[in-house]
C-alpha cells in the first residue's frame, strides 16, 4: 500500500503544480482575482486545474478501493497512467482545447477501471463473507 500512497501523493503534488501554473497565468495575463475569465490561455490553465480537481474526487478513493480489494501494484500502475494522462491533458488543452481528448482518455480510463474494479472487489469480498 505504500506505493499506492506514494502515487496518490504524486497526483496531489501534480494538482498543486497545476494550481501554481494557474497563478502564474493569472499574473502573466493580468487576470485579477477573483475573476476566472479573461485571457483565453489563463482560462485554459484554470480549466485544466479545475478538471483535475474533479477527476481527483473519483481517482483517490478509486485507487484505495482497487488497492484494498484487488491489487496494490495494479492500482499504482493505473495511478501513474492517470498522472501521465493529466500531463498530456494539460499540454493538449493549453495548446488547443480541441487537443485535450487523448489526455482526457488517458486519465479518465484509469479512473473508471479503478472505480469499477474497486466496486467489484468490494462486492466480491462482501459476498465471500456471506453477504
Image: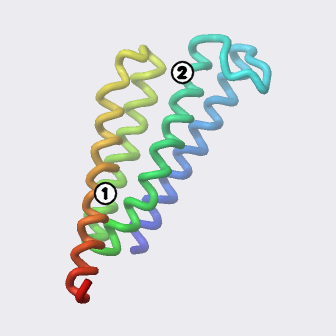
Name the front one of labels 2 and 1: 1
Picture residue at 45% right of the left edge, 29% below the top: 90
- Residue 92 screen position, x and y as percent: 39, 23
124 or 60: nearer the eye? 124
Q: Is residue 50 left or right of residue 67?
A: right
122 or 82: nearer the eye? 122
Picture residue at 56% right of the left edge, 25% below the top: 45
Q: Quadrant of the C terminus?
A: bottom left
Residue positioned most to the bottom: 129
Q: Quadrant of the N terminus?
A: bottom left
Mark 1 = which residue? 114
Lower sequence index among marks 2 and 1: 2
Picture residue at 32% right of the left edge, 26% below the top: 101
Quarter location, residue 66: bottom left
Q: Secondary structure at mark 1?
A: helix
Residue 44's tag is 2
Amino acid at each position: 500500500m505504500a506505493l499506492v500512497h506514494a502515487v496518490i501523493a504524486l497526483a496531489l503534488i501534480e494538482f498543486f503544480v497545476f494550481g501554481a501554473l494557474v497563478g502564474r497565468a493569472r499574473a502573466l495575463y493580468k487576470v485579477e482575482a477573483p475573476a476566472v475569465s479573461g485571457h483565453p490561455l489563463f482560462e485554459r490553465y484554470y480549466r485544466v486545474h479545475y478538471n483535475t480537481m474533479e477527476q481527483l474526487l473519483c481517482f483517490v478513493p478509486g485507487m484505495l478501493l482497487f488497492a484494498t480489494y484487488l491489487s496494490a501494484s495494479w492500482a499504482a500502475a493505473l495511478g501513474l497512467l492517470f498522472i501521465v494522462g493529466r500531463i498530456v491533458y494539460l499540454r493538449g488543452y493549453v495548446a488547443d482545447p480541441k487537443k485535450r481528448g487523448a489526455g482526457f482518455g488517458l486519465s479518465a480510463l484509469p479512473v473508471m477501471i479503478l472505480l469499477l474494479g474497486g466496486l467489484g472487489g468490494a462486492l466480491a469480498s462482501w459476498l465471500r463473507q456471506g453477504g
